[in-house]
Image (cartoon, helix red, strand yellow):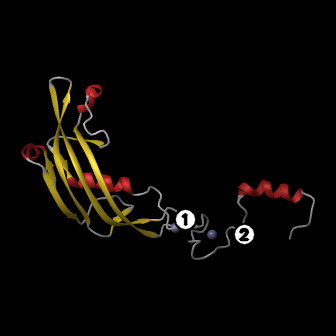
Amino acid sequence: MFIGIQELRLHEIKFQEEIPHLDLGPDIRQSSPLRTAGRAALLREHLGRKQEIEDIRVVGEFSARLELNCARCLEPIARELDKSFDLLYRPQGADAGRDELTVTQAEADIGYYTGEGLQLEDVLREQVLLAVPLKAVCREDCRGLCPHCGRNLNVESCECASGEPDPRWAGLEQFKSKLPGPTRT
Ligand SMILES: [Zn+2]
Ligand SMILES: [Zn+2]
């Protein structure tokens, strides 16, 4: 859905949409349509004395169910998102005279639009990606994959750790064998 500056000059745009597929990249899959509702409005900002720029403010909320992979064991995990947003988009290049800007909506997150407006889908894609943790884990104590054989250590164990010692520990092993004390078996 396009939010156009022409239309916004006439009236606010309300939206209520279900977006079945947003392109979220290879690591995040959408397992339900993203639902969103809100409104967009034009906001005039004065740059210095003469110049006036037209900002687009988008306020609303969205919810979605996503599937991503655990950063340690790579198993799929489900995440529910339910967020609200209040965003301000300035025309690209408008910040040249930044110091003179009156920030009308100080708390709003600021982005930029080019040309005649912006796509609601782009706004939401960005909001979803911001809301998803960079390294999600299936559970706090996920043991991940064995770096040697690739087995999922949450479901099975492997002999790698007890077999060949990690070369980084070799020095320590030598040191330990020189220590006096009870013989280790
Ligand atoms: Zn995991
Ligand atoms: Zn292993």
Distance from label 1 to label 2 (Cα)? 24 Å
Residue at x 30%, y 63% (from the top left corner): 63
Q: Which residue is mark 2?
A: 162
Q: Please provide percent x and percent y for residue 107.
A: 32, 42
**Spot occupied by residue 157 in the image (x, y as percentages of width and height):** 63, 74
In the picture of the structure, the residue carrying the numbered disc 1 is: 140
Dot 2 amino acid type: Ser
Residue drawn at the location 60% of the way across and 76% of the way down: 156
Residue count near mark 1 (Cα–Cα under 10 Å), binned few <14, some 14–19, many ≥20: few
Q: Earlier in the sequence, mark 1 or mark 2?
A: 1
41 displayed left or right of 166: left
Expressed as whole percent of the image width and height from the top left, the position of residue 131 reads: 37, 56
Q: Of discs 1 and 2, which sits in the foreground?
A: 1
Which image quarter holds the C terminus?
bottom right
Query: Could you say whether the residue bearing mark 1 is in a helix, strand or loop?
Result: loop
Can you say which quadrant of the picture contains the N terminus? bottom left
Which amino acid type is shown beneath numbered disc 1?
Glu
Residue at point 72%, 65% (across, down):
164
